[in-house]
């Protein structure tokens, strides 16, 4: 077992992540302004859902579940901010997508990924059968994006969804734009809820057991809940 963060470090990092995400939610400008945290988490979540759609549950982002469960996302709290955010975002996405829980976020994500498939921005079927030990970057779906890929930036899953939403809006079709806005709201709520769920788990346990950082929200607020702070469900 590796050495984990101290209780003080755990509290400090959770405070920082929550503060930054809440600030992003409150200061975002306009319908198509996600903010960097929302974009990272949102595009990885869609990428992971894409993996499930093409029946590659053990590829890309989702393939690292066991590795994530054996490592802490941070130890000293002095890790680079982007590195720390990515470590937490990755754990959130893998935990929630593989949890098996069906909710509005999961259902809407499948729906919007389906829209991207219909527009041939993603392909539903694989053009290649993954070879043993083949590197994930070589497992393409035949569309523009890799199922389960961690690419963030121009042309990523959320970028494609935003662009398609804007095109539909300009042509008078507002349904996808509404779905896009609702997706952003739900992914922010889910990530914030996951961060807040750690408040109810013993900070000593979080510094001792690596796997706790890769558990879904439902387990954090039920199975692993201690006498910590009350769980604050985001609006």
Image (tube, grey):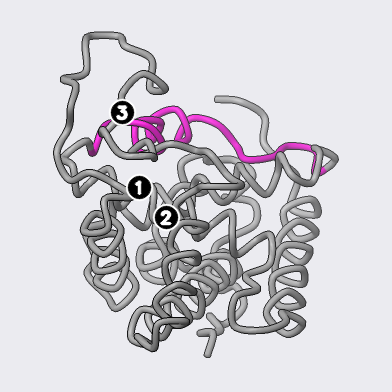
Q: Residues within 10 Å of mark 1 (few under 14, many from 20)?
A: many
Q: Is 36 one of the magenta-colored residues?
A: no
Q: Is residue 169 left or right of residue 8?
A: left
Residue furthest toward the right?
Answer: 78
Residue carrying label 2:
45
| Camera-side mark, 1 or 3 | 3
Q: Is 63 one of the magenta-colored residues?
A: yes
Residue at x 71%, y 39% (from the top left corner)? 83
Q: Residues within 10 Å of mark 3 (few under 14, many from 20)?
A: some
Quarter in which the N terminus is drawn: top right
Q: Is residue 77 left or right of residue 3?
A: right
Can you tell which quarter of the image residue 227 is in? bottom right
Can you tell which quarter of the image residue 174 is in? bottom left
Can you tell which quarter of the image residue 12 is in? bottom right
Q: Earlier in the sequence, mark 3 or mark 2?
A: 2
Q: Residues within 10 Å of mark 2 (few under 14, many from 20)?
A: many
Residue at x 31%, y 11% (from the top left corner)? 134
Distance between mark 3 and mark 2 Cα atoms: 18 Å
- The residue lying toward the viewer, choosing from 186 and 29, is 29
Residue carrying label 1:
48
Q: Reply above or below: 194 against 61.
A: below
- Badge 2 vs badge 1, beta-carbon distance below 8 Å: yes
Q: Is residue 217 left or right of residue 126?
A: right
The mark total stands at 3
Distance between mark 2 and mark 1 Cα atoms: 5 Å
Residue at x 56%, y 84% (from the top left corner)? 232
Q: Secondary structure at mark 3?
A: loop
Residue at x 53%, y 80% (from the top left corner)? 231
Residue 140's label in the rendered image is 3
Residues drawn in magenta: 57-77
- The residue lying toward the viewer, choosing from 114 and 204, is 114
């Amino acid at each position: 077992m590796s050495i984990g963060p101290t209780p003080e470090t755990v509290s400090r990092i959770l405070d920082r992540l929550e503060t930054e995400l809440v600030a992003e939610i409150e200061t975002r400008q306009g319908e198509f302004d996600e903010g960097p945290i929302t974009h990272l988490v949102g595009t990885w979540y869609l990428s992971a859902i894409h993996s499930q759609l093409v029946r590659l549950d053990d590829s890309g982002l989702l393939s690292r579940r066991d590795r994530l469960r054996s490592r802490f996302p941070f130890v000293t709290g002095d890790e680079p901010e982007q590195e720390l955010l990515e470590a937490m975002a990755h754990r959130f996405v893998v935990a929630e997508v593989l949890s098996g829980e069906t909710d509005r976020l999961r259902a809407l994500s499948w729906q919007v990924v389906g829209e991207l498939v219909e527009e041939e921005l993603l392909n539903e079927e694989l053009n290649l059968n993954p070879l043993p030990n083949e590197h994930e970057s070589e497992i393409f779906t035949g569309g523009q994006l890799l199922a389960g890929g961690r690419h963030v930036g121009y042309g990523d899953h959320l970028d494609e969804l935003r662009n398609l939403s804007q095109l539909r809006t300009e042509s008078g079709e507002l349904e996808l734009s509404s779905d896009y806005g609702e997706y952003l709201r739900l992914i922010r709520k889910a990530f914030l809820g996951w961060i807040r769920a750690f408040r109810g788990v013993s900070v000593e346990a979080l510094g001792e057991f690596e796997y706790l950082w890769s558990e879904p929200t439902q387990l954090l607020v039920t199975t692993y809940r201690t006498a910590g702070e009350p769980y604050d469900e985001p609006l």
